[in-house]
Amino acid sequence: MSVLVYAESLKGKLKKNAFEVASYAYKVAQDLGTTVTAVTFNAQDDATLGTYGVSKILKVANDKLDTFNAKAYADALAQAAKAEGAKVIVLSSSSDTKFLAPILATKMDAGYVPNVVAAPDSTSPFVVKRTAFSNKGFAHTEISSDVKVIGVSNNAYGVVENNVSAAVEDFNPSLTDGDFAVKSVEVDRVSGKVTIADADIVVSGGRGLKGPENWGMIEELAQVLGAATACSKPVSDLGWRPHGEHVGQTGKPVASNLYIAIGISGAIQHLAGVSSSKVKVVINNDPEAPFFKAADYGIVGDAFEVVPKLIEKLKEFKAQNA
Amino acid sequence: MKILVCISNVPDTTSKINFTEGDTKFDTNGVQFVINPNDEFGLTRAMWFKEKQGATVHVATVGGAQTEPTIRKALAIGADEAIRVNAEPKDGFFVAKQLAEVVKNGGYDLVIAGRESIDYNGGMVPGMLATLLEMNFVNTCIGLEIEGTQATALREIDGGKEKLSTSLPLVIGGQKGLVEESDLRIPNMRGIMMARQKALNVVEPVDAPQLTKDGKFDKPAPKGAVKLVSPDNVGELVDLLHNEAKVI
């Protein structure tokens, strides 16, 4: 009857979103008068989940699951949910999780609501608040099925410490060949860079930067801040930056703590995609750019003058606060 | 190869979003509807399979008669035939059940849907459809090649991409990258004329439970005025971000 969590890891290490979904699940478990069980796959540091309210860890150790496989992971999670009699399953909003969630929900005859931004409005009936219309609105959605699957938006609930003692148990799901009918051939992940999905800070460039050769200062600003780099749709369509960096309505959503837009005018589709970011800064030489209406802080000025100054000031700041 | 492209009828990306009937319904007043952008990339890739590999391409949607202009547009772009399941989409699972029936009856080898619709952003129909049909499934697909019954797909992952190998029958959750923005087609007059002659079959829905229901909608709180910092005093921005916003 526990609340089940899929605690994601990468190369044996739990991801930050694992702690956020655990924190969220703890809140749901409190409301329902039960406890949280997490499932981990080949993670070395699972015991840390106890800090975020997880009482029991079902530890899956299986070489075949070293690389993420949506169907196999969904199968394992469904078996764990059944073994635990879980009625609520809490997931993140990573691209891997969005891949497996509908498979898992269908296996469990469960209603699935992704992009959830707050603790449940109520647990009876079970109602959650989620984004809709690409962040231009919110919906309060009731899940009426017996088992419920929730996808929590990045950075929406936050990581909350609730120390409990976590018991670790081995869990061996039975997997079939059919689970591996989609095979990973090659994973090409940029190493040493923060991804947009995991970033606390995102630095984004638009067409105002005039060409791909001018991205050095964007990269440098991102590096000083430990931020991910992103770009507007025209920049990705022009091939100045890879598609994976395109943020906005048809690109990736951004839900960082700080979003810095440089040379981006702020088309409605772009603003929708980044509106979940908590603090937005815009640097643009056009005072009429729509982004100024959506931003918290702004500088009207030439990016090629302002950004190098900003990098310099941030370096001074970092040196003082190191 | 027989391909089904699933089309969602969504408000144009520039639409202002408002709610009506006590904030319980999306206000369609003055809203222009289009093919969901993620579906349009898939439809365009399907056209490539039609032209280069002789595939047959059908399109399907779940919706009332008001969605027909959007389906006709898909026919004008080049799809051979269309199916409309005559029901208001209640939730993702309901839509997946309807489309599963269409796929079963049509015997499709490849089903291409968008990663998510830009209105309700559920992102669940392709995965649910694949699971109901026991077909292989690749989500956030940014590249797809088919040789015989073998498929090679590229998938966007957080911070990179992954190459996958699988086989037909296959369901794809597609997005930009399947084709480029510049590959998208605007229907020409000949296409529009031909689309009028093509079959648009209306079928009645099958029973399916509704598992989720949107109650009330609301909009983000209005934003306070932007705080402007002089370009000659960039240090002030660093101060504000540290001391006021507390984000650095």
Image: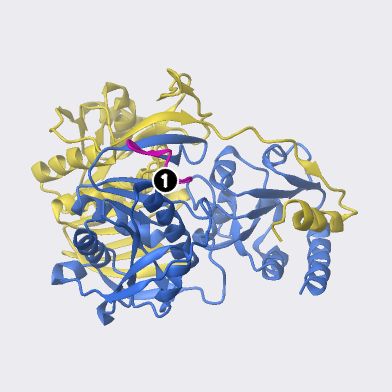
Chain colours: A blue, B yellow
- Residue A158: image x %, image y %? 53, 55
- Residue A38: image x %, image y %? 34, 65
Q: Quadrant of residue B179?
A: bottom left
Rendered-image quadrant of the N terminus of chain B? bottom left
Element class at badge 1: loop
Q: Quadrant of residue A40?
A: bottom left
Left or right: residue A25 compared with residue A60 = right
* Residue at x 40%, y 59% (from the top left corner): A95
> On screen, A248 above or below A23?
above
Residue to which mark 1 is pinned: B184
Q: Is residue A52 visible?
A: yes
Q: Which class describes the residues within 10 Å of circle 1: few (<14), some (14-19), or many (20+)? A: some
* Residue at x 79%, y 66% (from the top left corner): A314
Left or right: residue A48 compared with residue A56 = right
Left or right: residue B201 compared with residue A155 = left
- Residue A237: image x %, image y %? 53, 53
Q: Is residue B139 visible?
A: no
- Residue B47: image x %, image y %? 29, 48
Front-most of residues B21 and A190:
B21
From which residue to which does the magenta span run?
A: A115-127
* Residue at x 54%, y 46% (from the top left corner): A273
* Residue at x 31%, y 22% (from the top left corner): B66
Rendered-image quadrant of the C terminus of chain B? bottom right
Q: In the rendered structure, does residue B142 fall within the stretch colored magenta?
A: no
Q: In the rendered structure, does residue A119 fall within the stretch colored magenta?
A: yes
Q: Amino acid at mark 1?
A: Leu
